[in-house]
Image (tube, rainbow, N blue to C red):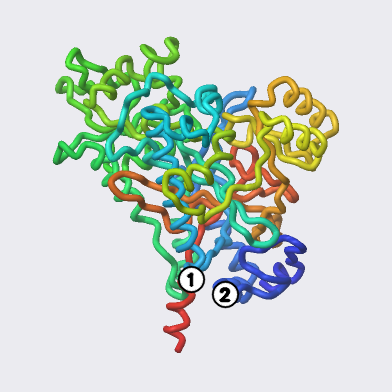
């Protein structure tokens, strides 16, 4: 397959697998040598096999458009992204540190509010956040943990420095695709898993079930369910997959009711049966029409009353989205110092808070060079990527910033790392990020690696599948054990 690789050149970008043209990194040497030695026809056949695998297993996602909802096969790139285990161990520690601080922050602001009282964070940053829910005041979920499932997005710059781009704490998605990517890679490249020592990821459903059960320590065998908005949701495949893999009952809001005793019950052909733990994949706005949006047909009337009474556990807890706010993101390093008395292991991307006059003036002066994000959007929507935007778009955002500066942050346009990717009969560098998944209950578990997302369009920095992105299997490779075996 050398003819496909001969022109591969990451240029000035940090490459995840190569430190220079035709020069693999130590931990990816065996992987790249294997791929390079394959005949082009054999490699192309593996690509086709991976596509068939995804289609036959029904691995899809939904794109919402004006023309209707379109189900598409999950976009998967066959060349894995590898990370050395030594680096990953530090990253894992940093993610555990970060989620501990975030959970302490959420617990604090719904109770004592010490971080505000001590002047570490302005009150209005918290109370004006779209994710803040006054209805959660005074609550303490099991273990003091609000964000039980977190997907933190990591990016690497041109020097190879790893940054946390954002924390997804409301209803983070993608873990099913991480698991399916691994299954597909194992089926098309089984020999590579014998050649390399790659950390497994298939224990996630078991850890998820254990974490959810720990939210009702008073029960030896709690009944657990996954609450989905239904088949038309973009992540419904994942909802059904996780329910099946973790042994959860897949339910919609209409399948549940809250009794006069404040317990949650599911409707069955045998009558009502109690549900003790709910992994919800519905945003706060829609979870309880008695408390939030009265027009919601997705949630369960009275479920907030049941949760506040301690008669059902909900993961992630209502109100945890306050820490999903991109303005509050800028304060996470201060949270770590304040709550844990530690220096952050993982850094934030440098961030300007447009609510501060000095930061706003800097952003307005350098707008064509920056990335601008609204506080509460996700999925790559509502943002400006200055260097890739038209002059008209830049001026549109200038007006938005002047009229509502508190709703925006800005960051430098990082030269995101790249990884070799299959592109139209050749291999080319494409920008990537990484979403590891963190489970928090009575302990913290981090997936070894996570979901690597790929901007499939040349030059694009947008990795979201809803906007044309793809994905890769992520390998945590123990290079030290390989060296011992070789000796």
Distance from the alpha carbon under mark 1 to that under mark 2 = 8 Å
Quadrant of the rendered image containing residue 266: top left
Question: Does the image show residue 83?
Answer: yes
Percent position of residue 195, x then y: 46, 75
Percent position of residue 275, x then y: 22, 28
Q: Nearer the viewer, residue 353 or 200?
A: 353
The image shows a total of numbered marks equal to 2
Dot 2 falls on a residue whose secondary structure is: helix
The residue located at (71%, 39%) in the rendering is: 371
Quadrant in which the N terminus appears:
bottom right
Question: Does the image show residue 56?
Answer: no
Residue highlighted by disc 2: 34
Residue highlighted by disc 1: 192
Q: Residue furthest bottom?
A: 487
* Residue 159 higher or lower than 143, as above or below: below
* Residue 43 higher or lower than 59, as above or below: below
Contact (Cβ within 8 Å) of mark 1 with mark 2: yes
The residue located at (62%, 50%) in the rendering is: 454
> As drawn, is 328 to the left or to the right of 141?
right
Q: Nearer the viewer, residue 85 or 249?
A: 85
């Amino acid at each position: 397959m050398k003819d496909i690789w001969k022109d591969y050149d990451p240029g000035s970008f940090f490459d995840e697998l190569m430190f220079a043209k035709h020069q693999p990194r130590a931990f990816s040497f065996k992987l790249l040598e294997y791929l390079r030695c394959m005949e082009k026809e054999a490699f192309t056949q593996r690509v086709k096999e991976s596509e068939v695998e995804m289609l036959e297993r029904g691995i899809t996602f939904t794109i919402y458009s004006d023309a209707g909802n379109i189900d598409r096969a999950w976009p998967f790139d066959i060349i894995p992204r590898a990370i050395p285990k030594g680096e990953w161990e530090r990253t894992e520690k940093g993610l555990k540190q970060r989620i501990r601080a975030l959970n302490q922050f959420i617990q604090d602001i719904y109770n004592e509010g010490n971080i505000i009282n001590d002047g570490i964070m302005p009150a209005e940053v918290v109370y004006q956040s779209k994710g803040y829910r006054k209805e959660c005041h005074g609550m303490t979920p099991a273990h003091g943990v609000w964000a039980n499932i977190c997907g933190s997005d990591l990016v690497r710059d041109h020097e190879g420095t790893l940054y946390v781009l954002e924390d997804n704490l409301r209803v983070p998605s993608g873990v099913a695709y991480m698991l399916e990517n691994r299954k597909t890679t194992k089926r098309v490249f089984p020999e590579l898993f014998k050649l390399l020592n790659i950390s497994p990821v298939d224990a996630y459903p078991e850890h998820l079930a254990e974490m959810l059960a720990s939210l009702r320590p008073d029960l030896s065998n709690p009944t657990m369910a996954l609450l989905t908005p239904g088949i038309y949701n973009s992540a419904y495949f994942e909802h059904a997959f996780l329910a099946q893999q973790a042994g959860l009952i897949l339910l919609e809001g209409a399948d549940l009711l809250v009794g006069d005793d404040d317990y949650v019950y599911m409707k069955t052909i045998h009558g009502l049966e109690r549900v003790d733990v709910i992994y919800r994949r519905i945003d706060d706005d829609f979870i309880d029409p008695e408390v939030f949006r009265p027009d919601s047909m997705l949630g369960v009337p009275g479920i907030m009353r049941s949760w506040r009474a301690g008669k059902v556990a909900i993961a992630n807890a209502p109100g945890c989205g306050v820490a999903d706010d991109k303005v509050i993101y800028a304060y996470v390093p201060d949270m770590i110092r304040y709550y844990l008395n530690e220096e952050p292991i993982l850094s934030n991307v440098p961030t300007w808070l447009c609510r501060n006059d000095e930061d706003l003036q800097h952003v307005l002066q350098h707008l064509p060079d920056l990335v601008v994000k609204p506080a509460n959007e996700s999925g790559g929507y509502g943002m400006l990527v200055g260097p890739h935007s038209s002059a008209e778009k830049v001026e549109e955002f200038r007006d938005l910033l002047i009229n509502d500066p508190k709703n925006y942050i800005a960051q430098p346009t990082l030269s995101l790392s790249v990884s070799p990717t299959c592109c139209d009969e050749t291999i080319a560098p494409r920008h990537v990020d990484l979403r590891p998944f963190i489970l928090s209950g009575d302990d913290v578990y981090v997936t070894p690696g996570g979901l690597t997302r790929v901007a499939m369009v040349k030059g694009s920095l947008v990795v979201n599948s809803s906007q044309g992105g793809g994905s890769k299997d992520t390998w945590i490779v123990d290079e030290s054990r390989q060296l011992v075996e070789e000796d």
